Image (cartoon, rainbow, N blue to C red):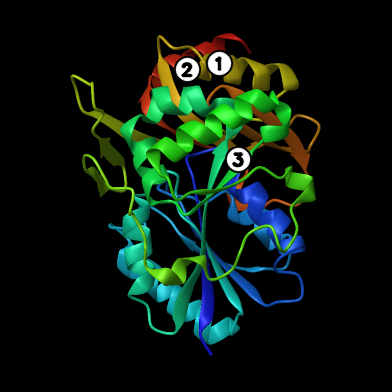
Amino acid sequence: MMVKLDIYSGLLGNGKTTLIKRMLKTAYAGFRVAIIENEIGEINLDAEEFEENSVSVKEVTAGCLCCTVKGSFQEAVRFLAERENPDYIIVEPTGAADIRGVIEACEQVDGVELNRCIMVVNARKIQTLLKVAGEFFHDQIRVARTIYLNFAEKIDAGQVQNIKKNLRKVNPILKIVDTPMEEVTGDVFAEKECLDGHWGTAGRKGKIVIRNAEEMVKMLPAAKDVKKLFTWTIRFPEAFSPERCNRLFALLQDRNHCELWRAKGYLPMEDGSVRKVDLAYDEIFQEDRRTVSEEKIGILILIGTKLDIQWMQDQLNQSQ
């Protein structure tokens, strides 16, 4: 029997991991599920989220699975299919992935069939996403079959309709789901939507190239220069106070020294706890955690176009 393969795409920090966790409780309840987590940084922090749900997780790090680690990804699919014998394999590619390449890589693996391909978009951040990611964001929409409009219930109904209208201008065949996250059930996202072979019928403009594990080159329609997306891994051996956490986020939002899409990690706190921190397009999330792998504590992964690390570290040291 073929293993169903579901892809959850979307830019960094739009809610892919949260949606997958919700689907594990609803659509995948009672089924055997394995997950492939892909990050362009050297450490995958999100795998921690799924391991708490007793789900088998295979990490593919240090590159994008649509090119630099394509072979590793295909081996991961085969490994999970043979060892775990799952009903579903969930793929969460990096937010910098060219989804056409991801789909192509999936299609080349024997024993699996594409089932769902869901792109997660933060409805509250549409304008920011267009400004930051430009043509890359548009191209993901052109490839998508289903878009999950996350946080749609947090904005005006008229705005939601306008967003849907504009999304369908980019891709007329889109199915758009705006069900609040806590109400997502097993029948919200149709199965076997990928099997009719109509990917990319809305057309494509430009070319997206991911060159290696450390940089993504994206061509913007009106850009004078080619922008590069980099990843940085910063280690903090010292414990943080809440005030120092807030100071760190303030520094990461300083546009004179930092242009970041995402910053996430687990920081050791002075009271002995571990705090999960997440900055996505200036939206900040913090949560105290109990179970975190020791090797991931004190690590912050940053993804963006510019970061003055020495300046940031000097500023943090001065605030101690």
Within 10 angstroms of label 1, few (less than 14), some, or many (20 or more) residues? some
Label 2 – label 3 distance at C-alpha: 34 Å
Q: Residue at x 31, y 42 (%)?
A: 214
- Image coordinates of residue 32 in percent, x first then y, are 67, 77
User: Where is mark 1, residue-wise?
Assistant: 316
| Three-letter code, disc 1 | Leu
- What label sits on residue 300 in the rendered view? none
Quarter of the rendering occupied by the N terminus: bottom right
Q: Please, which residue is most extreme toward the bottom here?
A: 1
| Among numbered discs 3 and 1, the one appearing first in the sequence | 3
In terms of secondary structure, where does tag 1 sit?
A: helix
- Above-or-below relation of 61 to 57: above
- Image coordinates of residue 158 in percent, x first then y, are 65, 24
- Image coordinates of residue 25 in percent, x first then y, are 77, 62
Q: Residue at x 24, y 27 (%)?
A: 221
- Image coordinates of residue 170 in percent, x first then y, are 39, 38
Are the residues flagged by discs 2 and 1 in contact, CB closer than 8 Å? Answer: yes
Q: Is 11 placed left or right of 294 in the picture?
A: left
Q: Nearer the viewer, mark 2 or mark 3?
A: 3
Q: Is 272 placed left or right of 152 in the picture?
A: right
Is residue 105 among the parts visible in the rendering?
A: yes
- What label sits on residue 312 in the rendered view? 2
- What label sits on residue 149 in the rendered view? 3
